[in-house]
Image (spheres, rainbow, N blue to C red):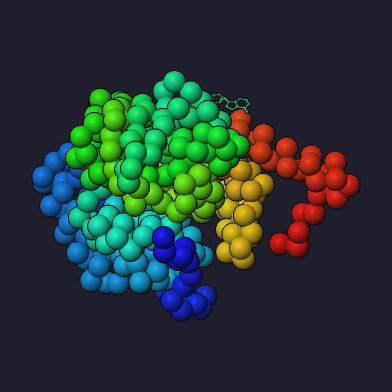
Amino acid sequence: MTAPNQTHGPDRKLTEEEIAGLRERVKAFMTEHIYPNEPFFHEHHPRRSAEGAAKLKELQAKTKAMGMWAPHLPSAAGGMGIGFMPYVYMNEILGRSTVAPMAFGSQAPDSGNAEILWQFGTKELQDKFMKPLVNGDIYSCFSMTEPEVSGADPTGLQTTARRDGDEWVINGHKWFSSQGEGAAFAIVMCASELDQPPHRRMTQIVVPSDTPGFNLVRAVPVMGETDGSHAEIRYNDVRVPITNTLGEPGSGFRIAQKRLGPGRIHHCMRWLGQMQRAFEMMCEYSLRREVYGSTLSEKQTVQNWIADSYVEIQASRALTLSAAKKIDQGDEARVEISAIKFFGAKVLHDVIDRAIQVHGALGVSGDTPLEGMYRGARAARIYDGPDETHRMVVSRRILQSFKAGNGWDFGVQ
Ligand SMILES: Cc1cc2nc3c(=O)[nH]c(=O)nc-3n(C[C@H](O)[C@H](O)[C@H](O)COP(=O)(O)OP(=O)(O)OC[C@H]3O[C@@H](n4cnc5c(N)ncnc54)[C@H](O)[C@@H]3O)c2cc1C
């Protein structure tokens, strides 16, 4: 096995001015190429239509030429090499549109899969799977959640990997493997070390989707999704080489933790982009829509919604950035990440909801992006762990600290 690589280590530390300049370039690209193409991609999703795929390739060629491709990865892995924090700030802008991460080569779950292949994959796995993935030539999925058992408590996952000579034999049933339909490979979470304690039983294994026994059952239809991409998959006696293992057997949870912590920050920054876009739409519309003799902006209810939204967005941003800075300093930031995961998901929902209400019937129509944003926001309270699990993590860890006589240090930030 190769030694783990450093995922986010920047090739060169960017200055604040450089980060600000990068954000301006991304904003300009969004205005020129992303927002105007949203209706087109709504009709022609790149994974479902040849026209959509061709148009996406055009945009990707532009971001590559501008040196803005794969911002989540170091340049040795085919990315921009800007490090964790600059990417966090960039994601706030990319998140304003679901099209942007695809155009910049950083859409989930490919981004997380590329990161763990870079950190824990052998050179052979990197050459075969990571390179074409990072280049945007193939898609992938992450296959962990199962219909029969709780995803919030993944110690009970039932998919198994049994050693047979130099091969794994995988059997199990997964669903919600996002992008599973059309994926060239899946990273599958399997119980392989059955005699070990729960958190050392799981192994992550790379499974090409053309392996016999990889059976795509269906794309589970999900509210807010136009590409029906959350796959139900049955793994029936799927045989792959033992060398397709990520890290060591039994390290599945540790690798998942490495992926999910920064991944949740990236979600939260993208949500900030969505909140800010909805907020801007709410403010602009309220200034021009006349109702009962004055604009909506003159009504105290609307003013309250704007004030509440502003405060909640700023609070979400502060919480997200403080968690991101802790991660950047090598802290796992478990409390901070869980706190912003459930708080951010609620603010995302509430701000979009208020923006829809201000727009009246227009808000629920397909003539603005708000209705799609709203449907997407509902799932945010569930994926990457439901609200209740994250509340449990926050309170449990804080109470543990109190029980140990340490109280809770809110820090200096
Ligand atoms: C849009 C979307 C994309 C996804 N993409 C992927 C993917 O790519 N790969 C993948 O493997 N999975 C994916 N998932 C699955 C997701 O990670 C799981 O749905 C999530 O972890 C919850 O698991 P579950 O659905 O089995 O719910 P369960 O674990 O069965 O939980 C059901 C409900 O129980 C409640 N609950 C849970 N824990 C507690 C608690 N401690 N206290 C009180 N109540 C509690 C919560 O309200 C929760 O919603 C995706 C899900 C969605 C919605």
Q: Residue furthest right?
A: 405
Which residue: 47% across, 51% down?
A: 248
Q: Is residue 311 visible?
A: no
Which residue: 59% across, 59% down?
A: 327
Nearer to the camera, 177 or 89? 177
- Percent coordinates x, y for residue 194 in the rendering: 51, 33
Q: Residue furthest top?
A: 148
Nearer to the camera, 132 or 67? 132
Nearer to the camera, 26 or 57? 57
Which residue: 29% across, 30% down?
A: 237
Q: Is residue 57 visible?
A: yes
Horizontal side, residue 172 vs residue 47: left or right: right
Q: Is residue 209 shown above or below 73?
A: above
- Which part of the image, by quadrant, shows the N terminus? bottom left
Q: Residue furthest left?
A: 50
Q: Is residue 222 shown above or below 253?
A: above
Which residue: 22% across, 39% down?
A: 211
The answer to which image quadrant residue 186 occupies is top left
Nearer to the camera, 295 or 368? 368
- Percent coordinates x, y for residue 77 in the rendering: 34, 67
Q: How many marks?
A: 0
The answer to which image quadrant residue 183 occupies is top left
- Percent coordinates x, y for residue 263 in the rendering: 48, 50
- Percent coordinates x, y for residue 246 in the rendering: 41, 51
- Which part of the image, by quadrant, shows the C terminus? bottom right
